[in-house]
Every structure is written in structure tokens, then in C-alpha cells.
Amino acid sequence: MLLDHLYSQGEVSVDDIDFFHELMNIRNRIAHGANATLDAGMARKLAEAVRKLVTEEWNETPPQQG
């Protein structure tokens, strides 16, 4: 699994893994028709985690938001 690989390479922390697993559970509930929501705080945390992974991996600055 990608998360396991990222963890083994030191790219994500145990806390990150837990957070991404929580998001995958929410995604699975939604995909299978269950009632689940993603609150704004979780969405911001997800965006920041992705931004961190992308900018560290490719040594880029994040795009400016319009």
C-alpha cells in the first residue's frame, strides 16, 4: 500500500497514517452509500498534508491560490 511505503521511507508519520486511514474509512462509507461527512477541519488537514508531500518531494513551492 502506498501509505506503508511512504511511512517506510520516512515521508509520513504514524499520526499521518492514522489520519489517512480515517479519511479512507470516510471515503468507503460514502462510496457504499452510508451517511458520512468530511468536516472543514479535516479537509484543511488533508490539503496541508498533500501540499507538504508534494512540495517536499519535488522541492516546489505550492501554487498560489487565486
Image: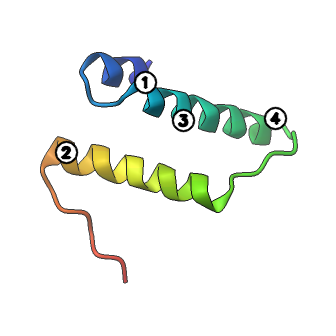
Taking the image as shown, residue 4 lies to the left or right of residue 53, namely right
> Which residue: 59% across, 52% down?
42
Q: Is residue 64 above or below residue 18?
A: below
**Within the image, what quadrant is residue 43 found in?**
bottom right
- Quick check: marks 1 and 4 in contact, CB under 8 Å? no
Q: Residues within 10 Å of mark 1 (few under 14, many from 20)?
A: few
Expressed as whole percent of the image width and height from the top left, the position of residue 57 reads 19, 41
Q: Identify the amino acid type marked 3.
A: Phe
Q: For the residues marked 2 and 1, what is the alpha-carbon distance in whole angstroms? A: 18 Å
- Quick check: marks 3 and 4 in contact, CB under 8 Å? no
Q: Identify the amino acid type marked 2.
A: Glu
Taking the image as shown, residue 20 lies to the left or right of residue 58, namely right
State the residue position of label 4. Answer: 32
Quarter of the image that includes the C terminus? bottom left
Q: Identify the amino acid type marked 4.
A: His
Select label 2 or label 1 by which is in front: 1
Q: For the residues marked 1 and 3, what is the alpha-carbon distance in whole angstroms? A: 9 Å
Q: Is residue 34 above or below residue 9?
A: below
Q: Earlier in the sequence, mark 3 or mark 2?
A: 3
State the residue position of label 2. Answer: 56
State the residue position of label 3. Answer: 19
Q: Earlier in the sequence, mark 1 or mark 4?
A: 1
Q: Earlier in the sequence, mark 3 or mark 4?
A: 3
Q: For the residues marked 1 and 4, what is the alpha-carbon distance in whole angstroms? A: 27 Å
SS of the residue under disc 1: helix
Q: Earlier in the sequence, mark 2 or mark 1?
A: 1
Q: For the residues marked 3 and 2, what is the alpha-carbon distance in whole angstroms? A: 19 Å
Q: Identify the amino acid type marked 1.
A: Val
> Which residue: 49% across, 49% down?
46
State the residue position of label 1. Answer: 14
Q: Is residue 9 above or below residue 24?
A: above
SS of the residue under disc 3: helix
